[in-house]
Image (tube, rainbow, N blue to C red):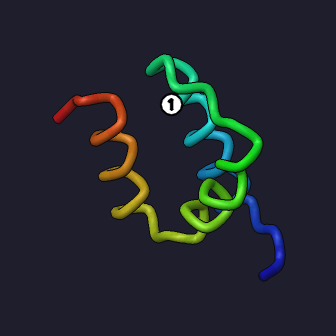
Amino acid sequence: MPETAERRRRRLDLHACLTVAGIPPRAGDLHAIEVLSLVDDTTHAALLRWITGTS
């Protein structure tokens, strides 16, 4: 699937959110982050909420 600005933003958001939460992504996690960057904005927002524990 081609790279889009939205996908790139979601991927960077996930990296940043995980790192701030004290969970630096491992090399093996990169595939999961790529897959999760394909979700829609509503699902992406839920993922970030779950990682950060915010509502």
User: Which residue in the structure is indicated by mark 1?
Assistant: 17
Q: Quadrant of residue 25?
A: top right
Pinpoint residue 34: horizontal percent, then vertical percent.
68, 61
Tell me: residue 19, above or below residue 35: above
**Depth check: 24 or 52 in front?**
24
Tell me: residue 38, above or below residue 18: below
Does dot 1 land on a helix, a strand or a loop? Answer: helix
Tally of numbered tags: 1
**Residue at left 67%, top 41%?**
12
Q: Assign the N terminus to one quadrant of the image.
A: bottom right
Is 53 positioned to the left or the right of 10 in the image? left
Pinpoint residue 26: horizontal percent, then vertical percent.
69, 37
> Residue furthest toward the bottom?
1
Pinpoint residue 55: horizontal percent, then vertical percent.
16, 35
> Residue furthest toward the left?
55
Tell me: residue 39, above or below residue 16: below
Tell me: residue 18, above or below residue 9: above
Badge 1: how crowded within 10 Å, few (<14), some, or many (20+)? some
Give, as a three-letter code, the residue at label 1.
Answer: Cys
**Residue at left 44%, top 21%?**
21
Q: Quadrant of residue 41?
A: bottom left
Is 3 positioned to the left or the right of 37 in the image? right
**Residue at left 46%, top 70%?**
40
**Residue at left 54%, top 62%?**
36
